[in-house]
């Protein structure tokens, strides 16, 4: 009964998405206020029904209703409650339902929190989101319905993939989807602006906080995914350039370019067309990511199903969205007036340079991700693009990006005197080069000292330029109290958010460089009682004992780690075998620390109590995720900027009057 | 030309040149990092280059896994049911590595025709078959059928 209710709710959701996509849009074009007013109720109704459908699926998992095919494949009576809930998005159908739910939530959020938008713009934005929703909900209903029944009903479910029975993975997909789908708001704002032909500072101001919030979620999602891969996959890597990781990284890069370009459009009225194009690009890359993951065309740990029908559906949908939006762009963009002029040396130029670099990197990752598909399709052989290539590419482009990142916040809009900028940067330059040399010189006998020096230099460069900017800003505003007043009264959240996020990049760069160059790894065979030295620590292997968990059995090892005489940590690496899906799973034993992680994972039993073990010493690995947290917090701070709300309120009420009148004339 | 225009032109030229050089470097590195996949039949037929990083995949032959007495070196055979290649790997095998399972190994072919792997991948899904391996099995099977058909025709 409940699954039928869910199915029915989903059909109603689709119907309302159709209403939302058609009527408000037409109403906004031929000026029918009654149809325009439909947008809000239709968005809320859609959200209600999709939420009911989602709740029905959650209920089916909690109640172990194995007559539902999807539940019988991914649920189990023995699953802990948390994982029964997260099992809802543990495979293809449910994760798409989560997509649809999050999309309709964003739609409702726009209708609630962007109340100051002129009614016509609001109707168009919601309507475009309704169109996207049609695509996803019909995809669910026609190719991957989570409520399909099965008969006969099995007594027990197939269980959630053990890899996913983990807190990190319970929250990673929702965060990532919040980011992916959140970019649809920026997309819809851009489409609505193109239709209205009004690309102005007000549009950028409306779009900015939404884009930033979506980007924050994407940042959190990617950071969580990286952290999960590190502790769960059992071999200590934190990024694999796996196609699916790339699929989340590309919209992030495009989103990063977008939030910077939006800033220029809002403040200076420049880059309008470029900003629109980036809005379209960022969401298109999100859709492409979904396509790559869900259609199973690329081999990856994440791909769920290789079903040609589904792949075709998403491909067609992708073509409609990308093709349609680009066609609209080609049609309307030439009418957009050029924005504010700027000189060669100005903040605009520096931001443009970084935008360019971000897009070049995105293009290369796209190339590396799609190349295997292209080669296969053209019969050139089956290839994979090696890990080192992606890294090389970043090493080529990232330093220039960071160089510009340091300069841009110090430069003036419109026109900057080059000499003055150089004078300001002189100290930062000297300090960072000095720090780079100090870091590199003691390691000169090693081949990679250059890289350490470079990374330290870049990070110090960022930190130094940020400090110079802060000092200038606070010269007349007494210290920390000044920051607080700035935030509360002046709405400079976006400035301090930028400082925080850029500082996060500095932390990240240091973390990545140090852990990549200095981590120590050893795979070895150990007998109980044996001690091994690694990176100044002694690892005493005490053997492995049988252990029993709630829904798994395991071999639980004990490794004591000593530094000198002192015991630093007792690690319990584990080899689990889940009772239902009998695949073995490695749970690493990790002693986490600010300056280093000690990481031990069990390989396999080699007979006689001996085991193969993998020991790692990973200096500063936590800084990678710490950087991610700083970046996300910076984004939140920027999005919470009071300026958006105060200014939007003032402007919007003026625009609502003028805007409607203008629309009526056209 | 207006001096300001000229300046802007220089700037654009500089940007294009810089990005162009970067793109050139990256594309050059791209070609060096392409790793082709070879099936055991192709390796045995000598189509795979030795000493260059490639990937080889197939099913792990039953009973072929031999472990060194006092270390972590493992030898095993992968097959596409037509030909077999021996793989040597030192380290910890993935959780899902089993005899009969489809795997993909990344590494280099040495001069004796042994594939020295740096990494062995087994998919985190026991019913999963790497698509390259599935294709290799399919091709080898077809060639076998055709060869048999030809054999019976000539008799």
Image (cartoon, rainbow, N blue to C red):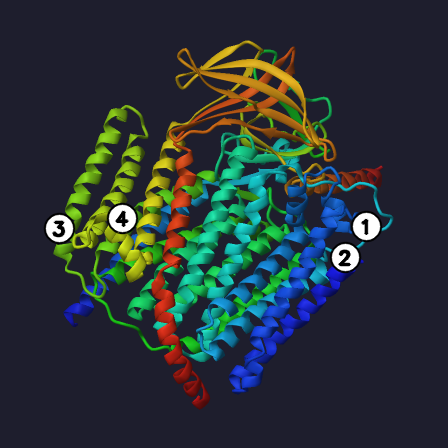
Instruction: Describe residue A212's horizontal placement relative to residue A74 as left or right.
Output: left
What whole-number distance in Å separates the C-alpha atoms at marks 2 and 4?
56 Å
Where is mark 2, residue-wise? A3
Q: Position of residue A646 (x, y in %)?
A: 35, 68
Q: Earlier in the sequence, mark 2 or mark 4?
A: 2
What whole-number distance in Å separates the C-alpha atoms at marks 2 and 1?
9 Å
Q: Nearer the viewer, mark 2 or mark 4?
A: 2
Secondary structure under tag 2 reads helix
Please report contact status of discs 3 and 1: CB closer than 8 Å, yes or no.
no
Question: What subunit carries mark 4?
Answer: A
Where is mark 1, residue-wise? A67
Please report contact status of discs 3 and 4: CB closer than 8 Å, yes or no.
no
Question: What subunit carries mark 1?
Answer: A
Where is mark 3, residue-wise? A423
Where's the N terminus of chain A, which quadrant? bottom right
- Which residue is drawn at the image coordinates 45% and 79% (left, top)? A196
Q: Which residue occupies the extreme bottom position in the image?
A: A665
Occupied quadrant, residue A160: top right
Where is mark 4, residue-wise? A403
What whole-number distance in Å separates the C-alpha atoms at marks 2 and 3?
68 Å
């Amino acid at each position: 009964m409940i699954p039928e209710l869910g199915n029915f709710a989903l059909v109603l959701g689709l119907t309302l998405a159709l209403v939302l996509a058609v009527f408000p849009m037409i109403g906004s074009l031929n000026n029918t206020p009654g149809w325009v007013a439909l947008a809000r109720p239709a968005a809320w109704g859609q959200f209600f029904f999709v939420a009911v459908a989602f709740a029905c699926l959650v209920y089916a998992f909690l109640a172990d209703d194995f007559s539902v095919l999807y539940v019988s494949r991914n649920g189990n009576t023995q699953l802990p409650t948390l994982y029964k809930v997260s099992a809802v998005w543990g495979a293809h159908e449910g994760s798409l339902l989560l997509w649809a739910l999050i999309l309709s939530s964003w739609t409702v959020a726009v209708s609630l929190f962007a109340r100051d938008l002129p009614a016509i713009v609001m109707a168009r934005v919601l309507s475009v989101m309704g169109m996207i929703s049609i695509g996803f909900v019909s995809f669910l209903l026609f190719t991957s319905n989570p409520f399909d029944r099965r008969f006969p009903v099995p007594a027990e479910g197939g269980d959630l993939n053990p890899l996913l029975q983990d807190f990190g993975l319970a929250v990673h997909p929702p965060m990532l989807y919040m980011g992916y789908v959140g970019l649809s708001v920026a997309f819809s704002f851009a489409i609505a602006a193109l239709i209205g032909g009004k690309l102005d500072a007000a549009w950028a101001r409306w779009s900015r906080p939404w884009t930033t919030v979506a980007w924050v979620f994407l940042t959190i999602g990617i950071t969580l995914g990286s952290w999960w891969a590190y502790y769960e996959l059992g071999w200590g890597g934190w990024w694999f350039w796996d196609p699916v990781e790339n699929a989340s990284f590309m919209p992030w890069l495009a989103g990063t370019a977008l939030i910077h370009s939006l800033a220029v459009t809002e403040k200076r009225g420049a880059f309008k067309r470029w900003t629109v194009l980036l809005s379209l690009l960022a969401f298109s890359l999100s859709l492409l990511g979904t396509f790559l993951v869900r259609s199973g065309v690329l081999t990856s740990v994440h791909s769920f199903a290789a079903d040609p029908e589904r792949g075709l559906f998403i491909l067609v949908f992708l073509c409609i969205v990308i093709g349609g939006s680009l066609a609209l762009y080609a049609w309307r963009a030439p009418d957009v007036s050029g924005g504010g002029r700027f000189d060669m040396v100005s903040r605009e130029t520096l931001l443009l340079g970084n935008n360019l670099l971000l897009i070049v990197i995105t293009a290369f990752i796209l190339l590396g991700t799609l190349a295997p598909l292209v080669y296969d399709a053209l019969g050139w052989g089956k290839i994979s693009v090696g890990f080192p290539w992606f890294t090389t590419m970043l090493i080529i482009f990232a330093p220039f990006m960071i160089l510009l990142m340091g300069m841009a916040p110090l430069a003036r809009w419109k026109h900057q005197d080059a000499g003055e900028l150089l004078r300001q940067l002189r100290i930062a330059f000297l300090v960072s080069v000095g720090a780079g040399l100090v870091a590199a010189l003691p390691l000169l006998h090693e081949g990679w000292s250059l890289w350490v020096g470079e990374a330290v230099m870049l990070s110090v460069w960022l930190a130094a330029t940020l400090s110079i900017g802060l000092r200038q800003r606070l010269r007349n505003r007494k210290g920390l109290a000044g920051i607080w007043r700035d935030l509360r009264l002046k709405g400079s959240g976006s400035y301090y958010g930028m400082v925080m996020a850029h500082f996060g990049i500095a932390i990240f760069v240091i973390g990545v460089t140090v852990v990549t160059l200095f981590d120590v790894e050893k795979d070895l065979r150990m007998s109980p009682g044996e001690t091994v030295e690694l990176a100044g620590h002694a690892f005493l292997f005490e053997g492995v004992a049988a252990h029993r968990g709630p829904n798994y059995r395991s071999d639980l090892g004990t490794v004591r780690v000593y530094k000198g005489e002192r015991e630093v940590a007792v690690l319990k690496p584990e080899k689990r075998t889940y009772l239902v899906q009998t695949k073995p799973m490695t749970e690493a034993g990790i002693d986490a620390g600010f300056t280093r992680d000690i990481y031990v994972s069990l390989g396999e039993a080699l007979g006689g109590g001996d085991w193969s073990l993998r020991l790692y010493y990973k200096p500063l690995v936590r800084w990678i995720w710490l950087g991610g947290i700083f970046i996300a917090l910076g984004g939140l701070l920027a999005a919470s900027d009071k300026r958006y709300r105060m200014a939007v309120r003032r402007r919007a009420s003026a625009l609502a009057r003028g805007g409607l009148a203008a629309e009526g004339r056209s | 030309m207006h001096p300001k225009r000229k300046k802007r032109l220089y700037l654009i030229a500089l940007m294009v040149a810089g990005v162009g050089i970067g793109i050139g470097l990256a594309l050059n590195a791209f070609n060096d990092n392409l790793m082709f996949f070879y099936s055991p039949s192709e390796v045995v037929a000598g189509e795979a280059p030795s000493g260059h990083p490639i990937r080889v995949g197939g099913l792990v032959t039953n009973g072929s896994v031999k472990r060194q007495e006092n270390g972590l070196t493992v030898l095993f055979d992968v097959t596409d049911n037509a030909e077999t290649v021996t793989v040597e790997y030192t380290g910890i095998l993935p959780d899902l590595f089993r005899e009969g399972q489809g795997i993909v190994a990344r590494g280099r072919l040495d001069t004796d025709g042994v594939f020295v792997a740096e990494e062995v991948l087994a998919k985190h899904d026991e019913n999963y078959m790497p698509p390259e391996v599935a294709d290799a099995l399919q091709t080898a099977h077809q060639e076998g059928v055709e060869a048999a058909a030809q054999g019976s025709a000539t008799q």
